Amino acid sequence: MSGFRLETGGRIDRSQPVTFSFDGKTYTGFAGDSLASALLANGVMLFGRSFKYHRPRGLVAAGSEEPNALISVNRGPGRFTPNLRATGVEIHDGLKAFSQNRWPSLAMDFGAINDRLGMFFPAGFYNKTFMWPRSFWDKVYEPAIRKMAGLGDAPTAEDPDVYASTYAHCDLLIIGAGPAGIDAALGAMDTNKRIVLMDEQDELGGGALADPALWPWLERSVKALTDAANVTILTRTTAFGYYHDNFIGAVQRLTDHRPENEDTPREKLWRIRAGEVVLAQGAIERPLVFDGNDTPGVMLSSAAKVYANRYGVAVGKTPALMASHDSGWHDVFALAKAGVGISAIIDVRESVDSALMLEAERLGIPVYLNHGVVGVNGRHNVSAVDICDYGNQRVHRVNTDALLMAGGWTPSVHLWSHSKGSLKWRDELGAYVPDLPNENVVCVGGCSGDWDFGTGAVIDMLPTPKDQSRIKAFVDFQNDVTAKDIKLAVREGFRSIEHIKRYTTNGMATDQGKTSNLNGLQIASSALDKPVPDIGLTSFRPPYTPQTFGALAGHAKGALFQPTRTTNIDSWAQAHGAVFELVAQWRRARYFPKAGENMHAAVNRECVAVRSSVGIFDASTLGKIEVVGPDAAEFLNRMYTNPWKALEPGRCRYGLLLKEDGFITDDGVSARLAPDRFHLTTTTGGAARVLNMMEDYLQTEWPDLDVWLTSTTEQYAVIALQGPNARKVLEPLVEGIDLSAEAFPHMAIREGTICGIETRLFRVSFTGELGFEINVPTAYGRAVWEQLMAQGAQYDITPYGTEAMHVLRAEKGFIIVGQDTDGTVTPFDAGLDWAVGKKKPDFVGKRSMARPDIVAPGRKQLIGLLTDDPNVVLEEGAQIVADPKQPIPMTMIGHVTSSYWSEALGRSIAMALVAGGHDMTGGTLHIPMPGKTHSAKVSGVVFYDPEGARLHV
Amino acid sequence: MILIHCPYCDEKRPEIEFANAGQAHIARPLDPSGQSDAEWEAYLFIRANPRGRHHERWRHIHGCGRFFNAVRDTVTDKFETTYKAGEPRR
Amino acid sequence: MSEALFRNEPVPSTPYVADGVSISLAAPLKRYSLRARTAEALETVLNVKVPQKIGATEGGIACLGPDEWLLRTAAETAMPTGAGLPVAITDIGERSICLIVEGPRAAELLMTGCPLDLDNFAVGRATRTIYETVEIIIIREGEDRFHVEVWRSFAAWLWTAFTAAASH
Ligand SMILES: [Zn+2]
């Protein structure tokens, strides 16, 4: 056992023991422990296996920069979280944690063979080695690599947890609640600013939590801030991204630190807009680069101080310090004060401040200046280190059970960089610090390079007399990148740090190089013999630390994933067994199967009912726009292809809408209610798009027109009543409208009441039968529907869904925009040239109808297809060829757009877009489908009642 | 999520209330039928793709509903200015 | 015959009550979209004061845009059609429903999905905006009381979203 709990000290609650497990073994810690500190206290030094070489790894740090100790936590089915840092997991009773990337066990890992073969895994190894044969990549190389190199397992079960989400606004957002952040909050507390102070840890204090001398100050400060009404304190909250205009994303962890899974949200996503941001994220200590620096027991000296002073845990009985910076000396003095025996202070520098020497002497700690560690003994834990006297190159051994690294400090400029603030290089720190802001933000304390840790030497790696090719000196612990890899990249010609980073993967792990970027830069700088600023700087990107998908999704799962729009009649359809489909965001009844019916049988029955008696259909989703104003007719005349000015009030017209490029974008039947008022309809999916397009022309091209557009899609429920008995069903319920064929012809609109409710009654038909579309105020849609059902019972009135609607319209050759057109179809291509006003000087899309490509021969045109075998229903989307005997690949001349079984005709029907199709009537085309190539005769698109006699009754 | 100043509402509002509507100051020809194929092609299809200052149209679609013009830097995503439809190019 | 017909509403008629906030369906209202180039043009037709500034409300009329106003009223008065005049008056009484969000946590609840700073949104102010992906109109009726207008087909989703957020 090398780690242990100190007799006194720390902020843990020794009266509250906590029982938890790691890899199935039970341990005890105290409330206030992190998983890392509790395991250390139990003597656990081995936390995981490395990504590539499966080397045994222990803790490097005590905070969120930890690169090695990635673990998984299992909170039950669907609640498995991989790749958590043991330093950030708070223990609680029943916590189940597991190590990762090892098989069969952490102590005896088969994959460690990779380490013995490590000479074969240099930078670019995968790219260079697994190139040939190509087919081996998917089946052999990649699965094997993925199995051996990896992090934790992704969970497969659905996440049962609830996640909250909110926007928030404040005048001052302070990120990081160490002394600098707390001072910023105290300084602003007495203003009327709304202040948010957040910190990723479970309590405020940051570095002060490891400095008992500051605890009285900390307690006073936290109380003052907690009492201030204008200060919101968010602990366990990680600001993960800094976006434009001071918009910050943060995740607050609400329940993971508690033993029970609860109904309350697990995490909360904060989307904060701040007037001013203060970044007080501190600085991260830099490891030193030397052979064996990844051995468990080698860690940052500042981390050892945190474990001792915050958690009351010694990281070893006799730790030694390897320093290039004064701060390490102060750390081991603090450890000595906490009762930890220090075996040696080794410093690469030839001389240090005499005060440090005096204090070391007073504490009886042996000091080796101008020395460096050149080897670490022990595989699963440090047992001794070999140090080299740089004066005479002699190496001797120091027995120790832990080695602390003090390589200087790196300001945490991650969020500053997200915000696109610029950085400047400071030689004396060997680090980039914030320079010019790009937002209203300031950096304070450690992250601005402002600290009182003393001074240090900036070095790339510790000098060593050993053969460079035989050592493993790690730079990026998480991605297993060594100094050798970076030098190799330089030798192979990489010059920019952006390229070196990608080639070696240095800094590309989940920790984004928090402990490795600067060392990597220094090594590349030495290898290239160029100053660091000349080889650039890699960018930090969100997230600062990995976040759960659950937190980012927030409410947007299950029923709240996205809105499902429903009509007023939807609840009736649901109650009557409708099968639904989604059309845009709308849920629409597709068909209404009776007991034992499949879709085919139900649709046939529904179609027959409409053709023989009467059917009823919920058409509420049709887009509606009310166009009102003195220039309403003029506006529509400019928008639609056909003339609108002469349309009389009370009459309807089919409108075809093109985009300026001449292609069909929407269609619908619209009515003139009054000289200055029109009721437009659009397709279900096109409603918002059409309104936006019309507003665009109105506001920006023709702002002189006195006309206004209002969406009335949801003002009216629309019930289509279709079939020869439609009028008979309607007559007893309607007042104020003469329904006779003479008084109320096809393509007319009347206003009156139905069941006492005001209605806009259209006489229109999308089925080819006598038909009405009843518009009533939406709240009454279901009630009117039920009245019609009752009134229609004597005619066996039949509700039908979108599938029957599609069949009925196809029998009549009515197109559906977006199904029979695809954004490249002109009115002429679709056979709708009758709907184009030839005499109109202009309308949207008219000029484009004369574009060279649009008047060229061979365009795809809409035709009808009747299969030679009437029982074959072609697949929609099937490709069409002229000659089935041509060699493969065949020349495809078009495709099937609509295809159905027509019960009315007793055969299949189809529509298709075929190059030059209008000239092929009577000819034969061929449609290869799975199993067989079918032949079909080209016809017109109107298959049923081509004279339209059934409409005018 | 950026903030965009709506020149009609005269305040900065969150980006998700807005919709981009493409390049600004492309007027529909008054007499489209009089346009040559080349002129019409230029009007329909040819758009600028600058690195830096870009004039574009936005609509405060989930707000006051108005289209307006903006100058945005395509590198920094910062809005230099916004102004009402019909006002001269800035 | 209209007495026999029921109104079918997309959200429960029973209020949802959580700690510090309640959500309830408002009684049916008449609603009109009023459009004109100026407030004066509408005042001439309607014979009432029409607010000039976007966001302002006066006498049940909210100014939503430079040429757009929303009139909400419980009164059974007949509206002029504005026929022949350069105005547009359109009945949108059943296009939306109104959810009343009330209580000390009312603003906080709306901000769970609405990106506006409702701490700085004066009583009496109205605006069209968005809650996550759904367009809404917010009218602050009192310090702790908001009206939220939402199109009917989105109302069930918004009710679920509001009640879920309120329960957190
Ligand atoms: Zn606006």
Image (cartoon, coloured by chain):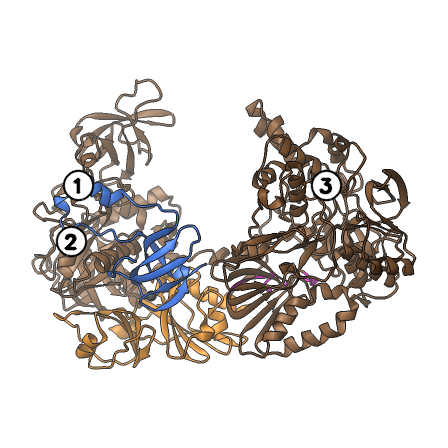
Chain colours: A brown, B blue, C orange
Q: Quadrant of ligand 1?
A: bottom left
| A669 to the left or right of C121 | left
| C64 to the left or right of A298 | left
Look at the numbered discs 3 and 2 and tell me whether their residues touch, using CB distance below 8 Å. Answer: no
Mark 1 vs mark 3: give the one in front: 3
Q: Which residue is mark 1?
A: A849
Subunit under mark 2: A
Look at label 3 and name its amino acid.
Phe
Which numbered disc, 3 or 2, marks the residue that appears first in the sequence? 3
- Magenta stretch holds residue A219: no
Picture coordinates of residue A2, whole percent (x, y) = 87, 51
Subunit under mark 1: A
- Magenta stretch holds residue A259: yes
Q: Which residue is mark 3?
A: A474
Look at label 2 and name its amino acid.
Arg
Q: Which residues are magenta?
A: A257-274
Q: Which residue is mark 2?
A: A638
Subunit under mark 3: A
Task: Using the rendered image, report if marks 1 and 3 lie on a common chain.
Answer: yes
In the displayed structure, A869 sits above or below A571; it is above
User: Callout 1: helix, strand or loop?
Assistant: helix
